[in-house]
Amino acid sequence: MSNVSELFQVIGGMSDADLAGELAELEGRAELIRAALQYRQRREAGPGGQTVTLGRAVEHDEAHPMRRPPPQGRRRAVLMVMRENPAHVWAYSGFREELITRGLLENTERANHALGVAMGKMVKDRLLERPERGFYKLAAPDQPALADERGEDR
């Protein structure tokens, strides 16, 4: 849009509800673009690199996982993401990238190792299943866990 009169020509025939819907759609796209840009910056920064946080702070929103406050601890982060789609089988590398994209894991070798150790322990504690090497999913609900999400014995 090059000028204000052009803008009013476009929105002049739209109802308030249509405008609100259009705005919500644009804000959703902007949030995805911010997340993609942050993901790209994290990958380019590498270990020990610094990145810039873009966008504005957003409130806690159960309907939008990107807006949830980060959980405390790796195990809770793993369970939070896996519980969003309990039947999904994740490749470790894809799951790691998902956590990095959401800002729940640093993009470092140390964090990668710690995540692998945590997920291995979660398999032993029956919180996760490993259907085959390098793939993980949430444990079946009928299988009693041996430890809770903090790693404490039950």
Image (cartoon, grey):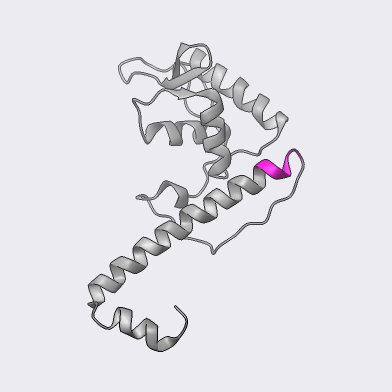
Relative side of 141 to 114, left or right: left
Observer-nearest of 15 and 145? 15
Q: Position of residue 117 (x, y in %)?
A: 62, 20
Observer-nearest of 22 and 90? 22
- Image position of 121 with respect to 51: above or below: above
Which residue is pictured at 65% across the width and 28% down the height?
A: 112
Residue 80, magenta (yes or no): no
Q: Position of residue 56 (x, y in %)?
A: 54, 64
- Report if residue 70 is visible in the image: yes
Residue 145 quadrant: top left
- Report if residue 59 is visible in the image: no
Q: Position of residue 135 (x, y in %)?
A: 48, 18
State how many labels appear.
0
Residue 80 quadrant: top left
Relative side of 24 to 58, left or right: left
Which residue is pictured at 50% across the width and 34% down the height?
A: 76
In the orientation shown, which residue stands out farthest toward the right? Answer: 48
Q: Which residues are magenta?
A: 43-47
In the orientation shown, which residue stands out farthest toward the bottom? Answer: 5
Which residue is pictured at 35% across the width and 28% down the height?
A: 86
- Image position of 121 with respect to 104: above or below: above
Give the prevailing secondary structure in the magenta stretch: helix
